Amino acid sequence: MVEGREADRRTGSLLWTHFGISGPVVMDASRFWTLATNRGAQADLYGNFVPGRTPDELRAWLTVQATKHPKRSLARTLALLVPERFAHSLCLYCSCDPLTTIAQVPRIDRNRLFDGLTRFRFPVEQDRGWNFAEVTAGGVPLDEIDYRTMESKVAPGLYLTGEMLDCDGRIGGFNFQWAWTTGWLAGQSAAQSLRAGDIASRTP
Ligand SMILES: Cc1cc2nc3c(=O)[nH]c(=O)nc-3n(C[C@H](O)[C@H](O)[C@H](O)COP(=O)(O)OP(=O)(O)OC[C@H]3O[C@@H](n4cnc5c(N)ncnc54)[C@H](O)[C@@H]3O)c2cc1C
């Protein structure tokens, strides 16, 4: 959310690390967080650890679990949905005792857990900065480029490629593809313009 509006929504793999969260979905989402934060806008990141299930479905599921396995602990029950260590930590984060038997969890605690599972607000402090970035946003505007040749319309004879241009993609090879494609095109075009220049200079 940027300034209270949804800026991006995506599903993918998330890693818990010693420094915070990472993984493809986090790196992709970080684009929106860093761009917004850099311009001074308020950016908030929420996670749903059980995508595809609504809070109502989860509530119904937990009721079934409480009936079928009333003596199973809260953390072990949640571990049917998410990794057990995370289930344990989430209980503590939501001020619930992970060892309480599922049948004894008060409704108010359950609601906090539902929120934690489906709309967890990540308390993001900062991105990891340039040294850990995989791609840069921003660069030379694309409307200053001739797409057929990658030549600059502003400075003819200058060919631009890859991350020099204002184009960045999500994780998944798109940035390599962009770099290689524009690089090949720019190289071919630059060589061709030199050959054309050679021919022109040799023409009496
Ligand atoms: C850790 C990491 C992992 C990544 N993984 C992926 C991935 O899995 N999939 C994907 O699609 N993208 C990935 N990327 C992004 C991708 O590598 C880049 O988007 C792509 O390489 C950009 O290509 P480029 O040619 O624009 O720039 P670069 O690959 O950065 O090439 C620029 C070159 O210019 C040279 N250079 C800089 N200044 C000068 C100078 N003054 N004179 C001469 N040479 C200079 C640099 O040494 C460098 O060799 C990853 C990036 C990083 C950092």
Image: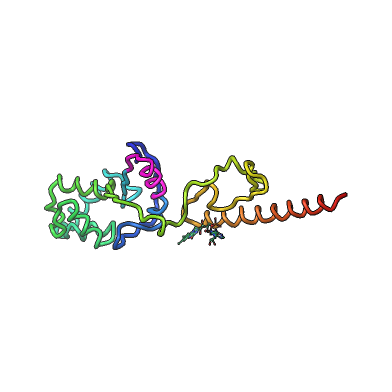
**Which percent across, then down, holds residue 63?**
20, 49
**Which percent across, then down, holds residue 64?**
22, 51
Q: Is residue 54 left or right of residue 170?
A: left
Looking at the image, which residue sits at the far top? 4
Looking at the image, which residue sits at the far right? 204
Q: Residue at x 15, y 45 (%)?
A: 108
Q: Residue at x 31, y 52 (%)?
A: 49
**Which percent across, then down, holds residue 148?**
67, 46
Q: Residue at x 20, y 59 (%)?
A: 75
Q: Main secondary structure of the magenta part?
A: helix
> How many labels were placed on the picture?
0
Q: Is residue 35 magenta?
A: yes
Q: Is residue 122 above or below residue 73?
A: above
**Which percent across, then down, holds residue 172?**
49, 56
Q: Pick the quarter of the image with the N terminus.
A: top left
Q: Is residue 108 magenta?
A: no
Magenta-colored span = 30-43
Q: Is residue 198 left or right of residue 190?
A: right
The residue nearer to you, when weighing 181 against 200, is: 200
Query: Which scheme is used to colour this image of the protein?
Result: rainbow
Q: Is residue 156 left or right of residue 55?
A: right
The residue nearer to you, when weighing 40 against 134, is: 40
The residue nearer to you, when weighing 174 against 99, is: 174
Q: Is residue 153 above or below residue 170?
A: above
